[in-house]
């Protein structure tokens, strides 16, 4: 069974549905480690010294409070992992480097044309992740 679950959260209703599904799953597993991943989407860096986590970390932590409350109500105290960069790339990298057994992510419910035109984080994650991935719609 899954012992290390990572859940990607962006504060959207879709990601909170993913959190709820992960919380229900975690209730069935003894001693599961849960990490809540949140990515500060930063694509371009200037020449100046800039730490996105330092600059935006507090706001990102506030955005995670509803997700953390869902886990706490399920009796789980997750670890918070703040990342920065391109969301899909950072989620995939963190899951691989962190040894996740399961990655849980919400889906925006895009149709095929929208997904092709604007892309989808969840689609890229399931396509490139090396660990099992649960996409919650």
Image (tube, helix red, strand yellow):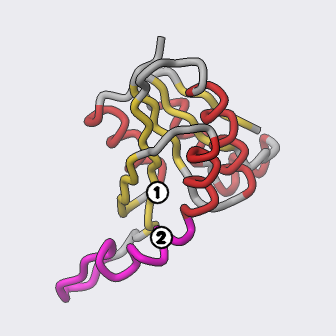
Residue 11: in magenta span: no
Q: Position of residue 125 (x, y in %)?
A: 51, 37
Give the answer, above or below, for where 87 lies relative to 124. Answer: below
**Dot 1 crowding, Cα within 10 Å, few <14, some 14–19, many 20+:** many
Q: CA distance from mark 1 to mark 2?
A: 7 Å
Quadrant (top left/top right/bottom left/bottom right) for the C terminus: top right
Tell me which numbered mark, 1 or 2, is placed earlier along the sequence: 1
- Mark 2 and mark 1 in contact (Cβ < 8 Å)? yes
Residue 8's disc is none
Say which quarter of the image contains residue 134: top right
- Nearest the viewer among 72 and 108 is 72
Where residue 67 sits, quadrant-wise, is: bottom right
Rendered position, 32 above or below 53: above
**In the displayed structure, would residue 113 be above or below residue 83?**
above
Q: Which residue is mark 2?
A: 60
Q: Residue at x 40, y 70 (%)?
A: 42
The residue carrying mark 1 is 38
In which image quadrant can residue 92 be found?
Answer: top left
Residue 59 belongs to magenta span: yes
Q: Secondary structure at mark 1?
A: strand
Nearest to the observer: residue 65 or residue 107: 65
Give the magenta-colored segment's residue range.
45-63
Q: Position of residue 69 (x, y in %)?
A: 61, 54
On screen, residue 125 above or below 117: above
């Amino acid at each position: 069974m899954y012992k290390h679950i990572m859940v990607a959260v962006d504060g959207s209703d879709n990601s909170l549905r993913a959190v709820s599904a992960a919380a229900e799953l975690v209730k069935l597993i003894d001693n599961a480690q849960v990490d809540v991943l949140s990515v500060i989407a930063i694509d371009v860096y200037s020449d100046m010294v800039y730490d996105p986590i330092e600059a935006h970390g507090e706001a990102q932590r506030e955005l995670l409070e509803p997700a953390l409350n869902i886990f706490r109500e399920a009796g789980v105290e997750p670890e918070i992992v703040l990342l920065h960069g391109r969301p899909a790339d950072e989620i995939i990298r963190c899951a691989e480097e962190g040894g996740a057994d399961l990655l849980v992510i919400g889906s925006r419910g895009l149709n095929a044309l929208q997904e092709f035109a604007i892309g989808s984080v969840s689609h890229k994650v399931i396509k490139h992740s090396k660990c099992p991935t649960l996409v919650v719609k």
